[in-house]
Image: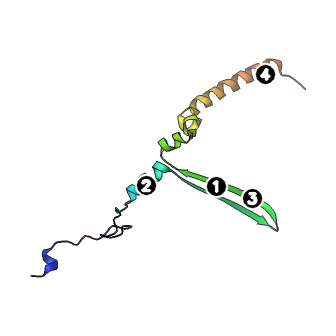
Amino acid sequence: MDRASSSGPVARPAYGSMGSGGGREPANLGDILERVLDRGVVIAGDIRVNLLDIELLTIKLRLLIASVDTAKELGIDWWKHDPFLSGRDRQLVEENRRLRRRVAALERPGDLDD
């Protein structure tokens, strides 16, 4: 009998591992994602469009990839205060309508002419 057929399937080292003698654990996508979210990654870059040494456009890009907990530790919690993301936008829209009605009602009787 052939030895390869009796030993069963042959395990291959995972992508990114050093093999059996390297001593490193294989890194899978879940481990990498956990590390990135735990520590955070910052990507920064600027795009500039110039024509004959005249700057026409500058775009500054800043990207932070982190877990919510890591972001809170860094003092980043804009999603709590953003009306659109926190659900307060409906309240602001309604308040805006009420204020516009009040302003219109106040302006009606006097019809101030300049």
Q: Which of label 1 and label 4 is nearer to you?
A: 1
Pick out the residue farthest to the top: 109
Q: Which residue is mark 4?
A: 107
Mark 2–mark 3 contact, CB under 8 Å? no
Q: Which residue is mark 1?
A: 61
Q: State the extent of the magenta-drawn residues as a range.
A: 11-15
Residue type beneath disc 4: Glu
**Along the line of sight, which residue is nearer the eye, 78 or 96?**
78
Q: Answer above or below: position of 40 versus 72.
A: below
Looking at the rendered structure, the kind of residue marked 2 is Leu
Badge 3 element? strand
The crowd level at tag 3 (other Cα within 10 Å; few <14, some 14-19, many 20+) is: few
Residue 109 placement (x, y as % from top left): 79, 17
The crowding category of the residue bearing disc 4, from other C-alpha atoms within 10 Å (few below 14, some 14 to 19, many at least 20), is few
- Name the residue at 49% across, 44% down: 70
Q: Is residue 45 magenta?
A: no
Q: Which mark is residue 33?
A: 2
Specify which label sits upstream in the sequence, 4 or 2: 2
Residue extending farthest to the right is 114
Q: CA distance from mark 4 to mark 2?
A: 58 Å
